[in-house]
Image (cartoon, grey):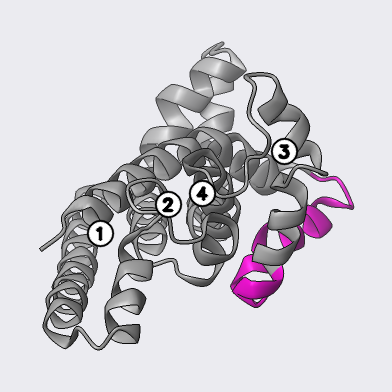
Amino acid sequence: MNWQPIVLTLQLATLATAILLVVGTPLAWWLARSRAWWKEAVATVVALPLVLPPTVLGFYLLTLLGPEGPGGWVASLWGARSLAFTFEGLVIGSVLYSMPFVVQPIRNAFEAFGDRPLEAAATLRASPLDTFFTVAVPLARRGFLTGAVLGFAHTMGEFGVVLMIGGNIPGKTKVLSVAIYDYVETLQWAEAHWLAGGMLVFSFTVILAMMTLEKRIGRSHR
């Protein structure tokens, strides 16, 4: 059994999830608290990967990350020609493709506790930054858990987007889903069964763990 695709996929999912939490948290906060009339247009853009075919998103990302797009200019800074068909390109694509799975649960959690806790913190002269980290984030921890788990699991199972922008380069862009596809294409059923079965067990475990933790967090709020 070749472990390279599994290790590469775990690295990709971990890095993409960390970036999504850093980028998605302030975005979710703004979507939850802003009164700008155009915020739902931003929310729609964030949610596009939920309905957009992966090949469409992959095509446009391939264009943007390729040598003729912005990705080519960025890659030229360290002497490369393109961000397409690189691990860095996979990270960018994964972050964009999994964005709604992280942003939406955190936004929902921020909206759920309303204004009262924030107003109480303000009366105690807490700064906006202190209020965010000491009040909003702890109250929204259920949303953070859901977002992190869904973002990680969704990145682990990506296929269309990663194949379009990463191709099938062993040790570099050949992730787990592409490896399963390869085994099926070459009629290596035993290897395909091992990887697919492992993903099935992983997905079941992740969902079960998330539901269990969410119940425990819900009880601690009562």
Q: CA distance from mark 1 to mark 2?
A: 34 Å
Q: Which residue is mark 1?
A: 214
Name the N-terminal-most of marks 3 and 1.
3
Q: Residue 194's x, y, as percent?
A: 12, 76
> Which quadrant would the N terminus be assigned to in this image?
bottom left
Residue 204 visible, this orientation = yes
The region drawn magenta spans 35-56
Is 159 situated above or below 123? Answer: below
Q: Nearer the viewer, residue 10 or 68?
A: 68
Residue type for callout 1? Glu
Q: Which residue is mark 2?
A: 173
Tell me if mark 3 has few (under 14), some (14-19) or many (20+) residues whose alpha carbon lies within 10 angstroms of its own: many
Q: CA distance from mark 3 to mark 1?
A: 39 Å
Q: Residue at x 63, y 40 (%)?
A: 83
Q: Which residue is mark 3?
A: 71
**Discs 2/4, front:** 2
Element type where label 4 sits in the image: helix
Name the N-terminal-most of marks 2 and 4.
4
Q: Residue 190's x, y, as percent?
A: 11, 83
Q: CA distance from mark 3 to mark 2?
A: 17 Å
Q: Quadrant of residue 89?
A: top right
Q: Residue 191's x, y, as percent?
A: 15, 76
Element type where label 1 sits in the image: helix
